[in-house]
Amino acid sequence: MSRPVVAVVGATGAVGVEFLHCLAQRDFPMSDLRLLASARSKGKTMDFKGGSLKVEELTAESFKGVDIALFSAGSGISKEFGPAAARQGTVVVDNSSAFRMDDKVPLVIPEINSEAIAKHEGIIANPNCSTIIAITPLWPIHKHNRIERLIAATYQAASGAGAAAMEELVESTRAYLEGREYKNTVLPHPYAFNLFSHNTKIDPATGYNEEETKLLRETRKIFADPTIRVSATCVRVPVLRAHSEALNFECERPITPEEVRAMLTGAPGIKIVDDAENSYFPMPKDASGQDDILVGRIRRDISDPSGKSIAMFVAGDQLLKGAALNAVQIAERLL
Amino acid sequence: MSRPVVAVVGATGAVGVEFLHCLAQRDFPMSDLRLLASARSKGKTMDFKGGSLKVEELTAESFKGVDIALFSAGSGISKEFGPAAARQGTVVVDNSSAFRMDDKVPLVIPEINSEAIAKHEGIIANPNCSTIIAITPLWPIHKHNRIERLIAATYQAASGAGAAAMEELVESTRAYLEGREYKNTVLPHPYAFNLFSHNTKIDPATGYNEEETKLLRETRKIFADPTIRVSATCVRVPVLRAHSEALNFECERPITPEEVRAMLTGAPGIKIVDDAENSYFPMPKDASGQDDILVGRIRRDISDPSGKSIAMFVAGDQLLKGAALNAVQIAERLL
């Protein structure tokens, strides 16, 4: 597969647009690029490398001759079209949660477990955004000194709920500032200058919502470590496209902030932003549009006297490393 | 002291306005109310119980005949005027950090340690807002099953940095939506659709900022428990006036979410908002303007297999229970 035919499924969505951005920016070698979306978007054109591509309607026939399909159109679409596309020879890189926990589907962050890609049977899953942004910077530490426990509190952007949610944040905020009423239709709660618990379903057995449960299960699968324990609190904040997370983690053996800093310095996909003197740390504003995950506030977790725990704060672009970029990086390993 | 003369220092600030609101709403018995502020605000008038009061300039003479002074004008003003006011007989309830860790100054959340008020020597300190909002709901639990460790990630509102910061959030967001440049002057980073680590000084020895260190030290003092271990990550989010916090805590003995719910039901100053079915949990929008601290997402911390740990999410009005209301509640106990 040296110059594959690539299809983007969900091309007009928030992640779809970033797929195109990443493919162009990274000069991904292709012999053809097909943009697929719902009937509603059929005939729309999208810019790509100075030219313009027409959006086609996604149908069962769309994948004929397609080598790699990047899916980001929700679990339903992935389930409906992904397996059939894979059966007829397309390698599906799926951004939805549809197949992530399937034993036959590798779940991949290339910086962590790119070797898992080779085991695919037609579908490779892209992890959830909040998992990618939390654990890409944890891996270089975990490799040296196993992380046994992680407590994460997330500050998640609108983009995780799609382009319509980003627009709802903008429009509801505009209405608030102009003193107008605004009826939210995309997200379950008013979003202007507000925040709320991630509105995925809560598991009555544990009290954790799906987003939080993903952080536990996906981390175990990607790290190939079924014993790591994760408690997450996932919160949607009025930010447009980068997730931040406060992470407290406990290692197997004592560890110092200096060791963590050394492990993360030069690690792929990571940038340390930890300037205490100027109070400059990871911020969504800086992470937006950037490939790297920003890591800062690296310090001892002083609530653990064993010296095995570290606290830090991370921020990453939800649409790039949290979604499109990670999927394109997977596709690059397929070539 | 049945109908004291009361002075409000910093009357025109964000907390000052709420002092007036609380005194009026709670019908605080007073024979006179004096509003004090800097020379700049001299002569301004403020509404109180349907009438109008003139703001006087704060001077060393301002406290003659004043029985209770509620201070919220920053540490500098508290240090300059508080001790002298106390010496000539005024009881100072101080909202700044100036005297909080002074052994001779009670640090009080009335729901927790109102008995400490009696020991005052002229000054009583009001705790930091993020401490009040975190630990008021932890106390009913701590009383029954000692909390040994707390990990807190905060989602702090603009109001904690004063009225000018609230205005900067509004004006910078307006500029962002209108595509205009905005130069932030109050807070150190752009605030529109952004968040950043709390911009207090970082202690080079620990890596924790002052806000985070307050949460540790003030909790120990208020709980009268020098052994409780606290690791906080304090973050400013683009919300106007209510702080939220993700709390993970570990008790001395195993504890269940049902026990926590029972301990918090009917606890003073607490309202449980924990409706998983409708994804309805504590939100700053609901906490704003409300006296109670909202508590929800009560669940086992599944990263601790001992069964001693709980995760929950809280939200409270930073200007009310986080500042003015708590101080007025202290003043009420003085009567």
Image (cartoon, coloured by chain):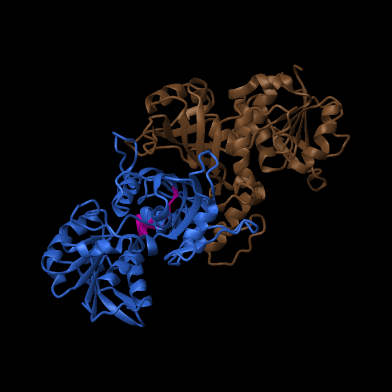
Chain colours: A brown, B blue
Camera-nearest residue between A281 and B314: B314
The quadrant where residue A307 appears: top left
Q: Is residue B133 above or below residue A73?
A: below
Residue B99 appears left or right of A173 = left
Q: Which residues are magenta?
A: B154-164
Point 37% across, 49% down: residue:
B187
* Residue A319 is at least partly visible in this image: no
Task: Inspect the magenta stretch and tell me whether residue B209 lies in it.
Answer: no
The N terminus of chain A - image quarter: top right
Residue farthest to the right? A61
Task: Inspect the magenta stretch and tell me whether residue B156 lies in it.
Answer: yes
Q: How many marks?
A: 0
Residue A167 appears left or right of B129 = right
* Residue A300 is at least partly visible in this image: yes
Residue A182 appears left or right of B309 = right
Point 59% across, 48% down: residue:
A158
Relative image position of residue B164 (x, y in whole percent) = 36, 58
Q: Is residue A252 above or below residue A155?
A: above
Residue farthest to the top? A2
Relative image position of residue B146 (x, y in whole percent) = 39, 49
Relative image position of residue B206 (x, y in whole percent) = 32, 35
The C terminus of chain A - image quarter: top right
Relative image position of residue B26 (x, y in whole percent) = 36, 76
